[in-house]
């Protein structure tokens, strides 16, 4: 696993999260707090973004040796209240990932799951897990946004590459 690949994956991760967040923020809090459907992991767009933030915060805390007893984010009751903590999290996450070497990816992380069970896993696959987890929830958010408004802009990796190389707006 390459250091540049993981750094690029997280640059994409942050870009895709922000792209959808900006679209959602323009819709207003009332629409974002409206229940869209129980078929989604979380029934409102706001709660889905809270979960994305919370999962990233939880895993960064675990990677850095901290303990988390619950998934952060549920306490953030508006989309606007998520932005500042998420900005801080992105800075911390970027600094952490940029400070990693290839050897760090093999380092075993010990953490406690939600049910209190102890787990151990190498950091590298956990880094991939968090980015992949967000892709799942971003697809749910995109579907929810389409249901309440219009289809949001593409957040695919190929689109990210084209946008960041000025081949696409």
Image (cartoon, rainbow, N blue to C red):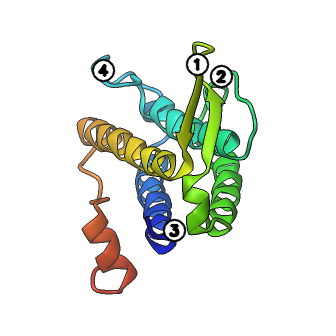
User: Residue at the location (68% across, 67% down)?
Assistant: 99
**Label 4 vs label 3, nearer the camera:** 3
Q: Which residue is mark 1?
A: 114
In-front residue for pair 35/158: 158
Name the N-terminal-most of marks 2 and 1.
2
Quarter of the picture containing the N terminus is bottom left
Of labels 4 and 3, earlier in sequence is 3
SS class, disc 1: loop
Asked if disc 2 and disc 1 are in contact, CB closer than 8 Å, the reply is yes
Residue ID at (74%, 30%) = 67
Residue on which the image places disc 3: 7
Q: Residues within 10 Å of mark 3 (few under 14, many from 20)?
A: some
Crowding around mark 1 (Cα neighbors within 10 Å: few <14, some 14 to 19, many 20+) is: few
Q: Is residue 86 above or below residue 38?
A: below
Q: Which residue is mark 4?
A: 37
Quarter of the figure with residue 143: top left
Mark number for residue 64?
none
Q: Nearer the viewer, mark 4 or mark 1?
A: 1
Left or right of 105 in this view: 168: left
Report the Cα–Cα distance between label 2 and label 4. Answer: 24 Å
Earlier-in-chain disc, 4 versus 1: 4
Residue picked out by circle 2 = 70
Marks 1/3: CA–CA distance: 28 Å
């Amino acid at each position: 696993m390459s250091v540049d690949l993981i750094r690029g994956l997280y640059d994409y991760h942050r870009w895709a999260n922000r792209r959808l967040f900006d679209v959602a923020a323009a819709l207003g809090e009332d629409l974002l707090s409206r229940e869209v459907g129980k078929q989604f992991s979380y029934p409102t767009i706001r709660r889905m973004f809270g979960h994305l933030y919370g999962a990233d915060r939880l895993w960064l805390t675990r990677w850095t040796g901290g303990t988390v007893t619950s998934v952060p984010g549920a306490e953030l009751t508006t989309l606007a209240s998520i932005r500042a903590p998420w900005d801080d999290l992105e800075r911390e996450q970027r600094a952490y990932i940029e400070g990693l070497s290839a050897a760090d990816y093999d380092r075993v992380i010990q953490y406690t799951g939600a049910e209190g069970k102890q787990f151990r896993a190498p950091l590298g696959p956990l880094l991939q897990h968090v980015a992949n987890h967000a892709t799942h929830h971003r697809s749910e958010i995109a579907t929810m946004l389409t249901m309440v408004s219009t289809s949001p802009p593409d957040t695919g990796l190929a689109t990210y590459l084209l946008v960041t190389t000025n081949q696409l707006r």
